[in-house]
Amino acid sequence: MSTERKPEPSCNRVMKGGKSVTLKMSIGRKALDNDKVLSRMIYEGMLVNEAQYCRPHLLTRCHLCEIDYDSINEEADEDRRRLGLRPCGDAALNARADKWGTLTSSKVMELQIQRELLVKTYGRNHLKTHPEQWQNYKKNAAESERQINDEFFAHEIEVSQCSYWACEQPDAAGLRTCAGCGIVKYCCKEHQAKDWAWEHKGECQLPTFLKQEYEEDRRRYLSGNYNKRDHHGIVQLSYP
């Protein structure tokens, strides 16, 4: 293991007391536990080796959470290339995010084309003049979303690398999963301790109410109901 000190990455971090920390660490767990709206906003993303993923599904572009972290992560990767460091995030999570991001984007584009064809064929007032066509469109859109999500939830999430940013052998065999979050992995206790101080302390444990809401959302999605929960905890309708 090299003893040469690596230049530290600086994206997704803020200064507090003269020290570079993550946003969650700067706010503090107590303040987040006492403010549910703020907690929903701050915890909707999770840092893994500096990359942002949606917390419930570990995607960089999540069709369920309606979040897109690609530009933030690209900025982090550019900073790391400049510093001569490995890419941010986890290789398996990034490949999974690319797969589902591409698939959902293509489906959205396909539905947009169908909607434009609907307008071109029946006019902009087709909701009133041809309601059956609009209902067919909504039915097809809902079925398309169900097919994507059924396949999405059938796949297990698996992190493949040591999550400490300075690890020189992140693909080492025998990685151990963090017992707190059950998500990130480490090649050794030393790197786990260093990542705890650097990043994971603010990411590891969710407030109990958020765990409950995420589980409720997961069950709702599995039932075919994809209505979204806002930052006030209210489940909103997805379609007019």
Image: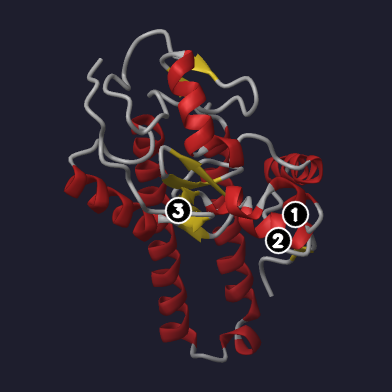
The span from disc 2 to disc 1 (Cα, nearest Å) is 9 Å
The mark found on residue 91 in the picture is: none
The mark found on residue 13 in the picture is: 3
Q: Amino acid at mark 1?
A: Ala
Image point (43%, 56%), residue name: 69
Q: Amino acid at mark 2?
A: Leu
Q: Are marks 2 and 1 in contact (CB under 8 Å)?
A: yes
Query: Mark 2, mark 3: which one is toward the viewer?
Result: 3
Q: Position of residue 68 (x, y in %)?
A: 45, 58
- Which picture quadrant has residue 175? top left
Q: Amino acid at mark 3?
A: Arg
Q: Is 22 above or below relative to 205?
A: below
Q: Residues within 10 Å of mark 3 (few under 14, many from 20)?
A: some
Res 106 seen here? no
Q: How is the image coloured?
A: secondary structure
Secondary element at tag 3: loop
Question: Which residue has dot 1 on it?
Answer: 31
Q: Is 99 above or below relative to 120?
A: above
Q: Residues within 10 Å of mark 1 (few under 14, many from 20)?
A: few
Residue most extreme to the top: 174
Residue placed most toward the observer, 194 or 125: 194
Image point (53%, 26%), residue name: 156
The mark found on residue 38 in the picture is: 2
